[in-house]
């Protein structure tokens, strides 16, 4: 299966408007954003766990990165409430599930194969810091290495946001809204911009909170799905 698999193109998915599609595991549904492969795939998705649902124990051969949008996710490493950011690197193993139910933004098979950095951050316990060279922006840094940077950002009401993107970007709206390319982006809207592009947006009157990843789209050819 290939979905939004041309990484040289701008892609927009307003995922909250899509129907949920059942996964192979009972009680787990998803909304696909991009995908290269079948059940073992390089994929970006919104995933919903029904209360009491879980996946079987499994190893992430290509790594798993996720942000908890709603509810509480749990596995052997602990419980992760809404606002948690987790990176399970290649070769990591767990049994994911949720007692009350949860919704996640999930990225699979998108790690450097040699990456072994485990990350688990509850952003609800972290302060934002102002970006001095970007008026109207404050952020929490979630992860940064030579390939990519991941941040949680808050944009002030009415702010004009410009980001130059030599390595491309993904932006997921968590709350509020912004306008870009003539479109309104609301909660769970997802934008992917190719390497060499620029992001220019106007924030709505209530401000906006977003998950942002930059730099990683220079490394698509290096993805290993063995």
Image (cartoon, rainbow, N blue to C red):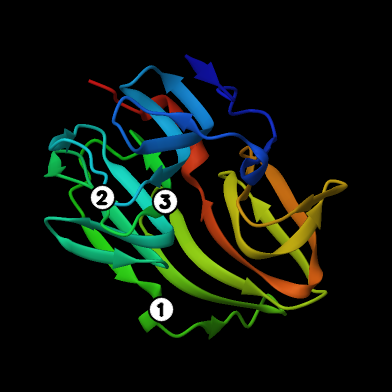
Q: Residue at x 45, y 21 (%)?
A: 36
Q: Where residue 122 sits in the image (x, y, percent)?
A: 33, 72
Residue at the disc numbered 1: 124
Q: Secondary structure at mark 2?
A: loop
Residue 222 lies in quadrant? top left
Foreground of the two, 66 or 200: 66
Q: Where residue 78 sits in the image (x, y, percent)?
A: 17, 64
Q: Residue at x 29, y 53 (%)?
A: 87
Q: Residue at x 57, y 47 (%)?
A: 170
User: How many marks are shown on the rendered structure?
Assistant: 3
26 sits to left or right of 18: left
120 sits to left or right of 162: left
Residue at the disc numbered 2: 52
Q: Secondary structure at mark 1?
A: helix
Residue at the disc numbered 3: 104
Q: Mark 2 and mark 1 in contact (Cβ < 8 Å)? A: no
């Amino acid at each position: 299966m290939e979905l939004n698999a041309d990484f040289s193109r701008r892609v927009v998915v307003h995922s909250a408007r899509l129907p949920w599609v059942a996964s192979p595991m009972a009680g787990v549904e998803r909304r696909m954003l991009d995908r290269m492969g079948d059940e073992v795939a390089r994929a970006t998705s919104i995933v919903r766990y029904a209360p009491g649902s879980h996946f079987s124990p499994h190893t992430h051969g290509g790594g798993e990165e996720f942000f908890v949008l709603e509810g509480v996710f749990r596995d052997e490493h602990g419980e992760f409430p809404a606002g948690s950011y987790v990176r399970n690197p290649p070769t990591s193993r767990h049994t994911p599930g949720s007692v009350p139910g949860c919704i996640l933004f999930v990225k699979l098979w998108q790690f450097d194969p040699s990456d072994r950095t485990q990350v688990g951050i509850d952003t609800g316990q972290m302060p934002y810091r102002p970006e001095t060279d970007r008026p109207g922006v404050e952020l929490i840094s979630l992860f940064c290495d030579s390939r990519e940077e991941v941040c949680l950002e808050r944009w002030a009401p009415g702010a004009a946001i410009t980001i130059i993107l030599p390595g491309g970007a993904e932006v997921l709206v968590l709350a509020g809204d912004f306008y870009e390319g003539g479109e309104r982006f609301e909660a769970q809207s997802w934008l992917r911009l190719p390497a060499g592009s620029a992001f220019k947006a106007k924030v709505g009157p209530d401000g906006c909170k977003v998950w942002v990843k930059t730099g990683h789209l220079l490394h698509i050819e290096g993805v290993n799905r063995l």
